[in-house]
């Protein structure tokens, strides 16, 4: 049996509209073990040097970098740069909606290449809620098949 304590992370996704400095302060004051950085939620989260400075100043590691459901090459490259600078080895991706063909195509065509070029980083796809479009039996999100996420895209869930 392992004696390691479970880590509790504060996701910046939960404090939308707050500045990152305040989020780090709240996380530090309330005893969180690290930060889950949702890139799209805060304008200042795109600044790699600023986020690294906060991580050092508050002595709170970025344990996970979360990408939006509209992931594109720019967002992915910032996440990878952030992961290297902050020594974070987990990037999670929110599943694009069924009509977001651009993000889905980008991920399905490029995820294998990003994984092979960044072997120390674990890519995860966030399992979307089981929602349908209106009254149609069509899934609202891509990557809703857990087997595909794991076997086809070789990602964590």
Image (cartoon, rainbow, N blue to C red):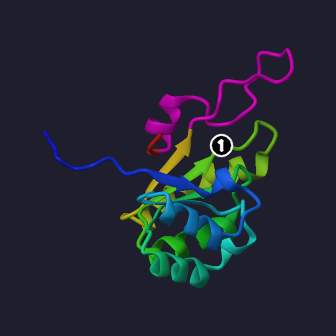
Image spot of residue 72 (x, y percent): 70, 61
Residue at left 47%, top 53%? 9
Q: How many marks?
A: 1
Q: Residues within 10 Å of mark 1 (few under 14, many from 20)?
A: many
Residue beneath label 1, please?
95
User: Where on the picture, by quarter, is residue 125?
Assistant: top right
Q: Is residue 54 above or below residue 155?
A: below
Identity of the residue furthest to the right in this view: 134
Q: Residue at x 77, y 60 (%)?
A: 17
- In the picture, residue 130 is in which quadrant? top right
- 145 versus 137 height, above or below: below
Q: Residue furthest left?
A: 1
Q: Is residue 86 magenta?
A: no
State the image coordinates of residue 29 (x, y, percent, origin top left): 50, 64
SS type, badge 1: loop
When asked about the image quadrant of residue 154, the answer is top left
Q: Nearer the viewer, residue 136 or 65?
A: 65
Is 53 left, or right, of 142 in this rendering?
left
**Percent position (x, y) of residue 93?**
59, 51
104 vs 9, nearest the viewer: 9
Classified by dominant secondary structure, the portion drawn in magenta counts as loop
- 28 or 83, which is in the foreground? 28
Direction from residue 122 to residue 20 in the image, left or right: right
Give the x, y percent position of residue 60.
44, 69
* Relative side of 6 to 43, left or right: left
Taking depth in this image into account, of 150 and 67 the one nearest to the observer is 67
141 inside magenta stretch:
yes
Taking the spot 22% from the left edge, 50% from the top edge, the residue there is 4
Range covered by the magenta-colored residues: 127-153
Farthest residue in the front direction? Answer: 29
């Amino acid at each position: 049996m392992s004696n390691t304590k479970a880590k509790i992370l504060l996701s910046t996704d939960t404090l939308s509209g707050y500045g990152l400095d305040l989020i780090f302060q709240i996380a530090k004051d309330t005893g969180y073990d690290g930060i889950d950085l949702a890139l799209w939620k805060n304008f200042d989260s795109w600044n790699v040097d600023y986020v690294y400075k906060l991580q050092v100043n508050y002595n709170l590691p970025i344990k996970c970098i979360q990408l939006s459901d509209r992931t594109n090459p720019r967002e992915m490259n910032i996440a990878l740069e952030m992961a290297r600078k902050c020594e974070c080895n987990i990037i999670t991706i929110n599943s694009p909606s069924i009509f977001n063909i651009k993000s889905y195509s980008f991920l399905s065509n490029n995820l294998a290449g990003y994984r092979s070029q960044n072997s120390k980083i674990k890519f995860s796809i966030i399992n979307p809620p089981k929602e349908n479009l209106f009254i149609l039996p069509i899934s609202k999100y891509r990557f809703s098949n857990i087997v595909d996420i794991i076997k086809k895209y070789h990602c964590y869930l």
